[in-house]
Image: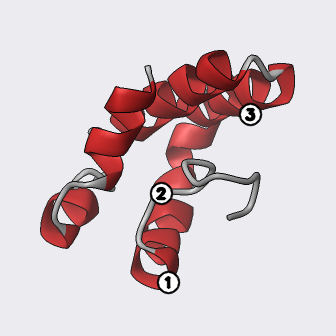
Amino acid sequence: MNDIIRSVNGLPLIVKLLLCIPCIEIVYGVCRVINGAAKNDVLWIILGILTIIPGACFMWIIDLVWILCKGHAFLLGETYLG
């Protein structure tokens, strides 16, 4: 499961930005749930689920800013806000 997160984080910047398009942004939500399952952390899984369904309206903006500032999508780093 960590290979999926590493491969998503290893994508070129332009591809990461394209994944922030509102309809395609669900990819990052699924990656957040996978990341939570890989870390066996219930909080990560809950946050991942909350970014898929209700968060799809606004999470693309947060992911866009997070990618430009930190290089990866929100909650896909090593720590919660890393």
Q: Is residue 11 above or below residue 28?
A: below
- Residue 54, located in which quarter of the rendered image? top right
Name the amino acid type tagged 2.
Ala
**Which residue ends up furthest to the right in the rendered image?**
43
Query: Quarter of the image containing the N terminus?
Result: top left
**Is the C-beta separation of discs 3 and 2 under 8 Å?**
no
Q: Amino acid at mark 1?
A: Cys
- Residue wearing tag 3: 47
Q: Quadrant of residue 13?
A: bottom left
- Specify the amino acid type for callout 3: Leu
In the rendered image of this protein, does residue 23 appear above or below residue 31? below
Q: What secondary structure is marked by label 1?
A: helix
Residue 75 higher or lower than 18, as above or below: above
Residue labelled with disc 1: 69
What residue is drawn where x is 36% and y is 43%? 6
Residue 11, given in percent of the width and then of the height, sits at 20, 55
Residue 73 numbered tag: 2
